[in-house]
Image (spheres, helix red, strand yellow):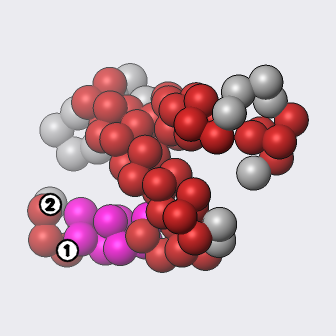
Amino acid sequence: NKFEQSSFLNKYGSWIITSILFGLWHVPTATPGFSAPNWNYGLLATISGFVYGLVWMRTRKITASAFVHAGVIFIWNFYLK
């Protein structure tokens, strides 16, 4: 929200930039079978960031995005590993 307000970008530009930053934040993370830097994980996190941003733009509540993020982590850890 602050980035959107303080930026020259509109809400969609801010959404794209923050999603990419979210993905880059996850690149140094090693996952089973992949060592860091893990660009595949960063790409998946970027795509997830778009979804979290979409949820935030629709609800304007960070808790909604946090619950979606927690759900993704739960599904990843218990069903996809």
Q: Give the answer, above or below, for where 34 lies relative to 71.
A: above
Q: Can residue 45 be seen here?
A: no
Residue 48 colored in magenta in the image: no
Q: CA distance from mark 2 to mark 1?
A: 7 Å
- Tell me if mark 1 has few (under 14), some (14-19) or many (20+) residues whose alpha carbon lies within 10 angstroms of its own: few
* Circle 1 residue: 78
Q: Can residue 13 be seen here?
A: yes
Q: Give the answer, above or below, for where 27 lies relative to 3.
A: above
Task: Identify the secondary structure beneath mark 2.
Answer: loop
The amino acid at mark 1 is: Phe
Identify which residue, 62 or 12, lies in the foreground.
Answer: 12
For the view shown, which residue lies furthest in the right direction? 6
What is the quadrant of residue 75 in the picture? Answer: bottom left
Across and down, in percent, residue 39 comes to 32, 25
Q: Residue at x 57, y 57 (%)?
A: 57
**Which quadrant, please, contains the C terminus?**
bottom left
- Left or right: where 20 falls relative to 47: right
Identify which residue, 39 or 49, lies in the foreground.
Answer: 49
Region of the chain picked out in magenta, as a range? 69-76
Q: Residue at x 79, y 24 (%)?
A: 8
Across and down, in percent, residue 23 comes to 45, 35
Across and down, in percent, residue 61 comes to 65, 71
What is the quadrant of residue 31 in the picture? Answer: top left
- Left or right: where 11 falls relative to 81: right
Cβ–Cβ below 8 Å for labels 2 and 1? yes
Q: Which mark is residue 17?
A: none
The amino acid at mark 2 is: Lys
* Circle 2 residue: 81
Q: Residue at x 26, y 30 (%)?
A: 40
